[in-house]
Amino acid sequence: MSVTELKEDVLEKITYGFYILTTRVSRTELSTREKDYIAAGTISWLMQTSFEPPMVTVAVHKDSDLNETIGKAGAFAVNVLGKDDRSLVDDFAGDSKIDGEKINGYHFLKGTETGAPVLDRGLGYLECKLMDTISNEGDHVLFIGKVVNSQLKEPEHQPLHEWETGKHYGGFAE
């Protein structure tokens, strides 16, 4: 077994959840749009990075629509998925389709503190104000957000873990 394969085997053992990351840029910030622009996607790399103030860090692929949009919006929402929300992982893995107040067929509301879309599905959400961005030679950008609003909608439900979906996002790119 090669050194790369050994590294991949260990990296694949790190546990993750799945989340839907959303953001919205006001049409006034974009000279090419007649309406607000919404980006949404499935992520698994999320961690809490501060208790006081409460902060989280998310990793977003450099080539994604989310990467560009979060930077322009200055805010994002993390929609925490529960075990009953497995279908959202695939439904948000590709391009976002916006139809009125729905993203990929799921209803959303405008976040009260950031304006980022908050899905009506899931265990809860975190609305975050962008505090810092870290980009280096890697293929992902880190966005550090201060939690400015949150809601736990389903306190009795359990979060969705990566291994429960049959999906995998970790280790080395193929």
Image: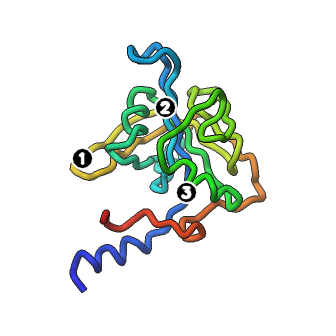
Residue 91: % across, % down: 57, 50
The residue at the point 32 percent across, 73 percent down is 8
Residue 102: % across, % down: 65, 34
The residue at the point 45 percent across, 27 percent down is 73
Of 115 and 121, nearer the camera is: 121
Q: Locate residue 97 relative to residue 68 in the image: left or right.
A: right
What amino acid type should be assigned to the residue bearing mark 1?
Answer: Asn
Vertical relation: 4 (above or below) 137? below
Of 117 and 158, nearer the camera is: 117
Measure the alpha-carbon separation of dots 1 and 3.
24 Å
Circle 2/circle 3 CB separation < 8 Å: no
Q: Quadrant of the C terminus?
A: bottom left
User: Which dot, 1 or 3, sits closer to the camera?
Assistant: 3
Residue hosting label 3: 18
Circle 1/circle 2 CB separation < 8 Å: no
Say few, some or many: other residues with alpha carbon within 10 Å of mark 1 (under 14 / 14 to 19 / 20 or more): few
Residue hosting label 1: 136
Of 119 and 77, nearer the camera is: 119
Measure the alpha-carbon separation of dots 1 and 2.
21 Å
What amino acid type should be assigned to the residue bearing mark 3?
Answer: Phe
Measure the alpha-carbon separation of dots 2 and 3.
19 Å
Q: Quadrant of the N terminus?
A: bottom left
Give the secondary structure at mark 1: loop
Instruction: Determine which of the numbered discs, if any, sits on residue 75 in the image.
Output: 2
